[in-house]
Image (tube, grey):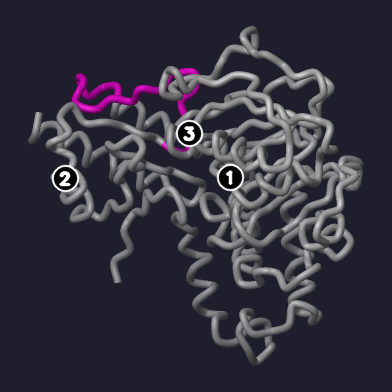
Amino acid sequence: MSRAFNFSAGPATLPESVLVQVREELLEWQGERASVMEVSHRGKAFIDCAAQAEADLRHLLGVTDEYAVLFLQGGATTVSALLPMNLARADQAGEYLLTGHWGEKALENAKASLATHVVASDKINAYRNIPEASAWQRAGNAAYFHYTSNETIHGVEFADIPDSGDVPLVADFSSNFLARPVDVSRFGMIYAGAQKNLGPAGITIAVIRRDLLGRHGRDLPPIFEWQNQVKNDSMFNTPPTFPWYVVGLVLKWMIAEGGTEAFARRNAEKAALLYKTIDGSGGFYRNEVAVSARSTMNVPFMLKDEALDKAFLKESESAGLMGLKGHRALGGMRASIYNAMPVAGVRALADFMNDFAVRHG
């Protein structure tokens, strides 16, 4: 077996040591004489596994008891549709700051159950920057202020936390979750699909300030009511047990590696190396995002001639570098360099890019 360096945007690369442990435990887990996928989520073994995952997540993020931590079925898109139902009354509005595709999707999901207000959008500039706060237009009756911390497709990331004033701040952290320390106390809610930076697809993490729940005054189906998940430790219905288990292993791996501070340093090193390669290519490669808004997780880049795209992808795969094709909305290439991508993988990509530019320049 020869594993490639996987730059896919999601589902994305996982730590090899975690995959090895999953393989070793797949047939018989924790002395249960069955796989973790086969045991009851109500049994002591899985309840302990779930509780440890929550404890480790709270440790890594510094989450206090003021917040509930939920492990939910589905993806961040589902959560973005449910959050207006759970956090806002019908007579309130949701504020949305748009910096890319996933912010747009969250906005569209909210429109079905809530009046929405776009605070600002960089769409006119093809989402290459973050709108200045001085240009924001705020709503007067907002229940929350939503933004996407890192736009996976457009490669735009907030370096700082926006100031939403007295309005609870809600953020989709799917593609930079646990990539650096975050002051959770600044937020009303953060959420993240696991499949980019934390585990396999099928489970989403939500961290919600408890006092925001139960105030919506809506008659929701019980399964849509997050208070029911809080009261039942995310097991109001059968949870996605296998992804939850893998997320728990990734969290333990992160703690052993030094936590979010260590990953922030490592991620900054990887991003700097890749952007240096792009910027130093003499125009052979280009990244069109404003330097101040460049993502440390998802790096889109174009070649000087689109006719070279197929050759780049074919040769990179032969070199053991996979998942570099850009999203269909933008074209070109995209390298996703999440926590589990080692520095060695980015060095290998940079070396390939330099060699390809020399041969095709």
Which quarter of the picture shows residue 142? top right
Crowding around mark 1 (Cα neighbors within 10 Å: few <14, some 14 to 19, many 20+) is: many
Which mark is drawn over residue 17? Answer: none
Q: Quadrant of residue 281?
A: top left
Alpha carbons under labels 2 and 3: distance apart: 25 Å
Q: Amino acid at mark 2?
A: Lys
Q: Which mark is residue 174?
A: 1
Furthest residue in direction bottom, as rendered: 33
In this view, 348 is above or below 249: above
Tag 1's secondary structure?
A: loop
Q: Of label 2 and label 1, which has the lower sequence position? A: 1
Q: Is residue 88 visible?
A: yes
Q: Disc 3 residue type?
A: Thr
Give the amino acid type for the residue marked by disc 1 in the picture: Ser
Q: Relative to 59, is 157 on the left or the right?
A: left
Neighbor class of circle 2 (other Cα within 10 Å; few <14, some 14-19, many 20+) is few
Residue 262, can we see it? no
The residue labelled by disc 2 is: 310
Depicted 233 relative to depicted 320: above or below: below
Instruction: Tell whether label 3 touches label 1 (CB within 8 Å).
Output: no
Indicate which disc, 1 or 3, sits on the residue closer to the N terminus: 1
Q: Residue at x 45, y 54 (%)?
A: 12
User: Which secondary structure, mark 3?
Assistant: loop
Residue at image position (59%, 48%) is 77
Residue at 63% x, 47% y is: 192
- Residue wearing tag 3: 296
Residue 313 x/y as whole percent: 21, 47
Residue range highlighted in magenta: 279-298
Camera-near label (1 vs 3) is 1
For the residue pair 160 and 4, the one nearer the viewer reads as 160
**Magenta region's main secondary structure?**
loop
Q: Residue 57: percent from the left, percent from the top? A: 72, 52
